Image (cartoon, helix red, strand yellow):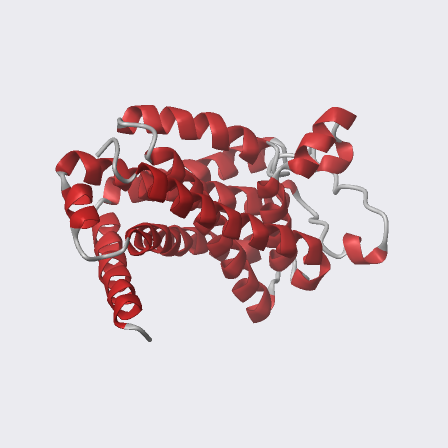
Amino acid sequence: MTPARASGRSACQTLTARELRRLARQPSRIIAAVGTPALLWIFLASGFAESFAPPARNGVAASAVAPTSYAAYLLPGVVTLIALFSSIFAAMSLIEDRHEGFLRTALVSPAPTWSIIGAKAVGGAIFATLQSVLALAAAPLVGLQPGLMGFASAAVAIGLISFAVTGLGLAAAWWVNSSAGFHGVMNLVLMPMWLLSGAFFPAEGASGWLAVMMLANPLRWGTEALRASLAGAPGEATLAWVILTGFAGAMGAIALLTAGRRSTRHL
C-alpha cells in the first residue's frame, strides 16, 4: 500500500469514528428516526388489518415471499423508512460541518477528499443500519421466521439502502446551504421513492402507470430484497439484490463526483 493510500485510509477510519460518535450523541434524532416509523407501522397495521389480502403473484417461488398479514407486509417498508430518516440526518452533518468550519479544515488537510466523503457515507450507513436492525426484532411477532441467514441478509439489504441514501444525501448537501432546506429537498425526493417502493401496496395491484414508476424506482428493489430476507427466502430476489447493489454503488460514486466538483465552493 502506498503512503498516500495508507494516509487516506487512516483518515477515513478516524473520520468515520468521529461520525459515529457525533451521531450517537444526538438522541433526539435517534428517537425521531425510529419512533415515527414505529408509530406509523403500529397504526397502519392495526387500521388496515382486516383490509389486506396477500398480493397475487405467478409462480411458486414468488409466492414463497408473500406475507400473510398487513403488519408483516408493512414491516420491510417501515424498516426502510427508519433507514431513510437516519441516513438523512447523517448526510445533513455535511452542512453542519460546513457552517462550523470543520469541512474547510478537513479539505485543506492532507486527507484526500474521498476519505472525507467515504467516512460520512460509511459512518452514516453504519449508524442507520444499527437503528434499522432494531426493528427486525418485530418480525417474529407478525409471523415472519427469517432464520439466522434471513436476518443476516436483511441486515445487508438495510446496509445497502442506508449507504445509497446517505450517498444521495451527501451529493445534495453540497448544493444546499441550510439544514431546513436540505430536509425539504430530501423529503421531496425520498418520500415519493418510499411511497412507490412497495412499502404500502404491491405493484401487482397498482394501476399501469404507477406500476411502471414502481418498477423504475431503485428503492423498490431494496424493499423487495428486504421482504424476501424477512420471509426467509433471500435467494428468491436475485434481481432485487443486483439492482440494490448497483444503486448503492451509483450513489456512492455520485457523492464522490459531486464532492470533487464542489469542494472549493459553498464552504
In this rendering, is residue 128 above or below 47?
below
Q: Quadrant of residue 3?
A: bottom left
Tell me where residue 220 appears, x and y as whole percent.
62, 42
Instruction: Name the side, left or right, on which 193 lies relative to 184.
Output: right
Let me know if residue 42 appears in the view: yes
Instruction: State the residue in front, 101 or 233.
Output: 101
Let me know if residue 34 appears in the view: no
Tell me where residue 212 appears, x and y as whole percent.
73, 32
Tell me where residue 261 appears, x and y as whole percent.
35, 39
Looking at the rendered structure, the number of numbered marks drawn on it comes to 0
Taking the spot 27% from the left edge, 63% from the top edge, the residue there is: 8
Taking the spot 70% from the left edge, 48% from the top edge, the residue there is: 68
Q: Quadrant of the N terminus?
A: bottom left
Residue farthest along the right direction in this orientation = 59
Tell me where residue 185 appears, x and y as whole percent.
41, 26
Instruction: State the residue in front, 149 or 170.
Output: 170
Instruction: Name the side, left or right, on which 86 lies relative to 70.
Output: left
In this rendering, is residue 51 above or below 157?
above
